[in-house]
Image (cartoon, helix red, strand yellow):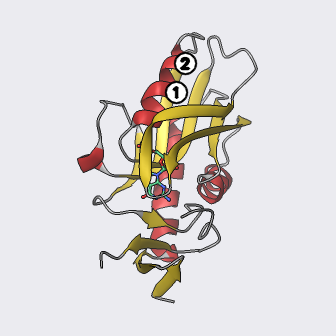
């Protein structure tokens, strides 16, 4: 399936599942190396990171503690500029290594603002792993330790990423086609 239509918008295939698999394996090897001798708390940002996090952590065979968090900043095709933390980590993170798993970094608003709330809780380290990143959209200087792929400024869906709750089930990643 090279093209799909959701609510009147057209998307074309952009990154196929084979390439996603290669990216995830590379990131998993990097993460495994990074956390030798440590048992990090892995914060998985719902819902878009679900497939990525699951594949990444299985591949990395990382001994870690998993926590799901939910932060919203996107509204349809655009970022709202404000974050809403719907589900946060409750436990003490003082002196712990924290690895945040995100699906895509766009303006960086979500991670910039959320990271500040974590820093107040004095973890030993905070590192970010994202599958995708749109460098041309970045508005904050956030330190992304592990980045799968830098992409152009186009809206994408699939492999967990949605458009109005459609498309999360797609194994490949699709890009919005400009009409
Ligand atoms: P930021 O705060 O960096 O601007 O946006 C991050 C969040 O916006 C991501 O976690 C994701 O939920 C959403 N987002 C950003 N770009 C895209 C995109 O191209 N497609 C989808 N489906 N969501 C996106």
Mark 1: is the Cβ under 8 angstroms from ligand 1? no
The front one of 47 and 146 is 47
Locate residue 157 relative to residue 90 in the image: left or right.
left
Around disc 1, counting alpha carbons within 10 Å, would you say few (fewer than 14), some (14 to 19), or many (20 or more)? some
Measured as percent of width and height from the top left, residue 138 is found at 29, 41
**Residue at (63% x, 26% y) in the render:** 38
* Outermost residue, left side: 136
Q: Residue furthest front?
A: 8
The answer to whether residue 23 shows anywhere in this view is yes
Q: Residue at x 65, y 71 (%)?
A: 169
Q: Dividing the picture into quarters, in which one does residue 64 lie?
A: top right
Mark 2 closeness class: few <14, some 14–19, many ≥20 residues within 10 Å: few
Q: Circle 1 sits in a helix, a strand or a loop, which is it? A: helix
Q: CA distance from mark 2 to mark 1?
A: 5 Å
Where does the image place residue 161, in percent across and percent down from the top left?
55, 61
Could you say which quadrant of the image residue 19 lies in? bottom left
* Circle number at residue 114: 1
Residue at figure coordinates x 58%, y 33% from the top left = 84
Q: Quadrant of residue 40?
A: top right
Whether 33 is drawn above or below 89: the answer is below
Does residue 112 sit above or below 106 in this rendering? above
Question: Which circle marks residue 95 in the picture?
Answer: none
Q: Which mark is residue 117?
A: 2
């Amino acid at each position: 399936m090279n093209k799909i239509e959701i609510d009147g918008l057209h998307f074309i295939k952009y990154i196929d599942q084979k390439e996603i698999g290669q990216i995830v394996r590379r990131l998993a090897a990097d993460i495994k190396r990074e956390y030798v001798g440590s048992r990090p708390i892995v914060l998985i940002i719902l819902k878009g990171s679900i497939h990525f996090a699951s594949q990444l952590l299985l591949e990395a065979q990382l001994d870690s503690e998993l926590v799901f968090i939910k932060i919203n900043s996107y509204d349809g095709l655009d970022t709202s500029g404000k974050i809403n933390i719907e589900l946060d980590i409750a436990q003490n993170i003082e002196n712990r290594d924290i690895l945040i798993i995100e699906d895509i970094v766009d303006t960086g608003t979500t991670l910039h603002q959320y990271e500040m709330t974590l820093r107040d809780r004095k973890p030993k380290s905070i590192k970010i792993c994202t599958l995708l990143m749109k460098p041309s959209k970045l508005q904050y200087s956030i330190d992304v330790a592990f980045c799968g792929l830098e992409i152009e400024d186009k809206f994408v869906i699939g492999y967990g990423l949605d458009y109005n709750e459609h498309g999360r089930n797609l194994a490949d990643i699709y890009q919005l086609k400009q009409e």
